[in-house]
Amino acid sequence: MRGIRLLQGMVLVCILLVPVLIFMFLRGFGDNTYDIPIFFEKGVENPFLECPIGDTTQHYIPDFTFTNQESQKIGKAEMMGKVTVVDFFFTSCPSICPVMSSEMERVNDMFRDEPKLQILSISIDPTYDTPEILQSYADKHKAKAGKWDFLTGDKTEIYQLAKCGFILPTLDGMGVPDDFAHSDKFVLIDELGRIRGYYSGTNREDVDLLMLEAKVLLYGNQ
């Protein structure tokens, strides 16, 4: 009889412990965070000496100002306090740009009603891509200025920004579409101007990840 009571007592203790264990599990699960890296916390390497000599502290997107499809000035100042998705493209691109722009449409659709996220698509062929050309391209992709801006400006400044600001390879095609070279990456920038991720703009799964991590920056503590 004593052994039965002991067994019953042990069973009762186990039953009582179940809610406690579940609570501890859920509490521990709730404390988990989705960590998004901060790129270039110790500065950016400059092996080809293309960029100004910097220090070894956190890299931030440098100051810039270009012109959007409505001939408005848009730049670094408009990025502050917002999450920004950036890519480099050109409207006459015969290869990856159409796919990238279609994928960026998905990003635009996902965050259309989110005022704290914006998109900047910067042309690497600013001689051809005037505001008028960019407006036509924006209309094609259902882009509204102020939400998804297509930018043009001084070519030297654009290439400097691509290579030294966003750390993306970029090659001037001198007006020949097939000779231009640029990255397919979408770059995720946080509200402080730090790079938080690179994602292939030609890969649907990568763009899905971009949208997920943009939501974490918007609604989490990252």
Image: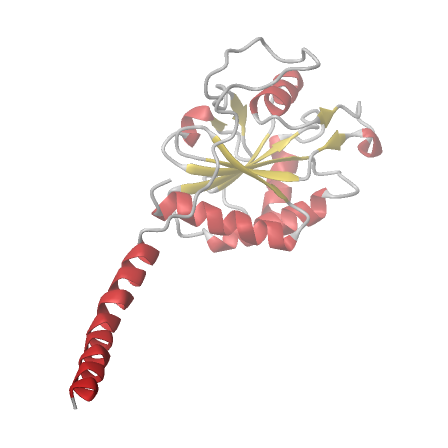
Among all residues in the image, which is located at the extreme front?
2
At 69% from the left and 27% from the top, the residue drawn is: 169
Horizontal side of residue 154 vs 80, given as left or right = right
Q: Is residue 99 left or right of residue 83?
A: right
Q: Which residue extends farthest top?
A: 53
* Residue at (66, 46) in percent of width and height: 100
The spot of residue 87 in percent (x, y) is: 60, 36
Number of numbered discs visible in the structure rendering: 0
In the image, is residue 37 above or below residue 34?
above
Q: Residue at x 52, y 19 (%)?
A: 43
User: In front here: 118 or 142?
Assistant: 118
Is residue 23 or residue 158 the one in the foreground? 23
- Quadrant (top left, top right, bottom left, bottom right) of the C terminus: top left
Residue lying farthest bottom?
1
Q: Is residue 142 visible?
A: no
Q: Nearer the viewer, residue 206 or 117?
A: 206
Tell me if I can see residue 129 in this picture. Answer: yes
Q: Position of residue 86 (x, y in %)?
A: 55, 36
State left or right for residue 51 relative to residue 180. left
The image's colour scheme reads: secondary structure
Between 27 and 131, the one lying in front of the other is: 27
Vertical side of 89 occupied by 75: above or below: above
**Residue shown at 80%/22% (left/top)?**
174
Residue 36's x, y, as percent? 46, 41
